[in-house]
Amino acid sequence: MFHGKVRAVGFDADDTLWVNEPFFDQAKAEVAEMMSVHLPSEKFLEVLEKTLSRNIKSFGYGVKNFVISMIDAANQVAPGNVKSSEIERMIDLGRAMLFNPVELIEGVEEVLQTLGSSYELLMITKGDVAEQQRKIDLSGMAEYFDHIEILTEKDGAAYESILRKHSIGHEEFLMVGNSVKSDILPVVTIGGSAVHIPFHTTWVNEVVCDGELCGREYVEISEVSELLPLLIYS
Ligand SMILES: [Mg+2]
């Protein structure tokens, strides 16, 4: 389908190459349970999501913003009543996340190996540089990529600048990722192609309503191995 047109393939990392969001979901559930004496869990999670989104502007993506936002949300819900032991637990949860193992998503390595002989491969991830670099190192996936980019935000301008830097034409570029907001929408908007591989859990801040896609087209597959028929055997 993309064969003959595309020459460079970008891969998102978190929840596309390796598992990430479930670690955040687990910590959110524990803190929501801890705060349930003040507010029902689902209500606390709503406050936490709003706080996370707001704090990204100040603290960026990643575990540090997550820890600050858990404490911030707890303090909004129970001002003056958050125990120091609860704050300590939130910090510990965050600290543990910085040492999580990296679990590759099934089929990723074989797909990268196969595509690497025919395409220029880019890993394009966003977040805290040290956090993302640790996962990149632990994953052992760096060797399959020609370029690795760690961004603070994945928007059209960021993708434009990567394509310019590596002299890749818009129509020659295909992005693969689990987030419509970060991996699909900005790329199809600038004239590239995109393949969406939904992960079973996607952060609410990464979910866009259908209207924002404005009828733009992208391909959706359920497993990374389904890229091969689209890029090699067609
Ligand atoms: Mg992702």
Image (cartoon, rainbow, N blue to C red):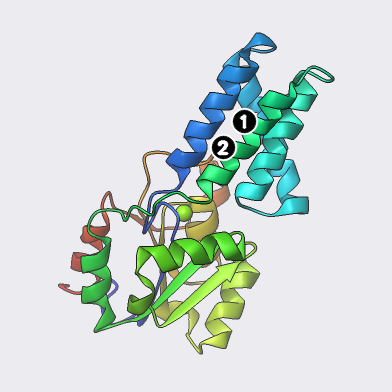
The circle on residue 89 is 1
Quarter of the view holding residue 234? bottom left
Residue at the spot 27% in from the left edge and 49% down from the top edge: 222
Closer-to-camera residue (230/47): 47
Residue at the spot 47% in from the left edge and 51% down from the top edge: 179
Q: Give amino acid for label 1.
A: Arg
Figure check: 23 above or below 4:
above
Left/right placement of residue 122 relative to residue 61 reads: left
Q: Position of residue 148 (x, y in %)?
A: 48, 75
Query: Which residue is labeled 2 in the image?
Result: 93
Q: Position of residue 35 (x, y in %)?
A: 65, 18
> Label 1's element?
helix
Q: Is residue 208 visible?
A: no
Dot 1 alpha-carbon crowd within 10 angstroms: few under 14, some 14 to 19, many 20 or more: some
Left/right placement of residue 54 relative to residue 234 reads: right
Q: Is residue 90 visible?
A: yes
